[in-house]
Image (cartoon, rainbow, N blue to C red):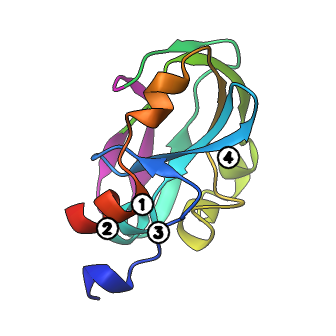
Amino acid sequence: MNSQDIEVDQQARYLDTHEWARPAGPGLYTIGISRHAENALGDVVYVELPKVGSIVKKGQVFGVIESVKAASDLYSPVSGTVIAVNTNLIDDPSLANRFPYTEGWIVSIETDSKADFDSLLSPADYQKLL
């Protein structure tokens, strides 16, 4: 598959490690992995979710995603407090493959720092990275 053909959410911004953040309200961001990441991983079999209330820092590991091929750390695109986790991934981790930008979201983070989000790769810049 050509990198230009890989779906990129135009509402999100990206880390170069292939996690995305999308605004979900004032100071609130939904986080997940990109279509490119789930394609590279293959069939996702397990997602290690952080605890609600955990403090995460931009660029630091907040969880792990495992596939039949490999385990990969998940890096937070923004700093803040985890206010929700997608518990549907516990019973059906393949949501991360099938719907990486919708039902396959991983966590919601509340932050005071819009600058973290603003400093992420734009959809166009992320597409160039691919």
Q: Main secondary structure of the magenta part?
A: strand
Q: Looking at the picture, how far across and down is residue 102, in whole percent?
A: 69, 61
- Magenta span: 59-73
10 Å crowding of disc 4: few (<14), some (14-19), many (20+): some
Give the label, 1 or 3, closer to the camera.
Answer: 1
Nearest to the eye among marks 4 and 3: give it.
Answer: 3
Instruction: Determine the CA span between mark 4 and mark 1.
Output: 29 Å
- The residue carrying mark 2 is 127
Front-lying residue, 27 or 73: 27
Q: Which mark is residue 90?
A: 4
> Which amino acid type is shown beneath numbered disc 1?
Pro
Disc nearer the start of the sequence (1/3): 3
Q: Residues within 10 Å of mark 1 (few under 14, many from 20)?
A: some
Q: Amino acid at mark 3?
A: Val
Left or right of 35? Residue 96 is right
Tag 1 near tag 3, CB within 8 Å:
yes
Q: Nearer the viewer, residue 59 or 11?
A: 11
Disc 3 element:
loop
Where residue 1 appears, x then y in whole percent? Answer: 29, 88
Q: Nearer the viewer, mark 4 or mark 1?
A: 1
Residue beneath label 3, please?
8
Q: Which residue is found at the position 54% from the left and 18% from the top?
A: 113
The image shows residue 19 at horizontal and vertical percentages of 42, 47
- Measure the alpha-carbon separation of dots 2 and 3: 7 Å
In the rendered view of the protein, which quadrant contains the C terminus?
bottom left
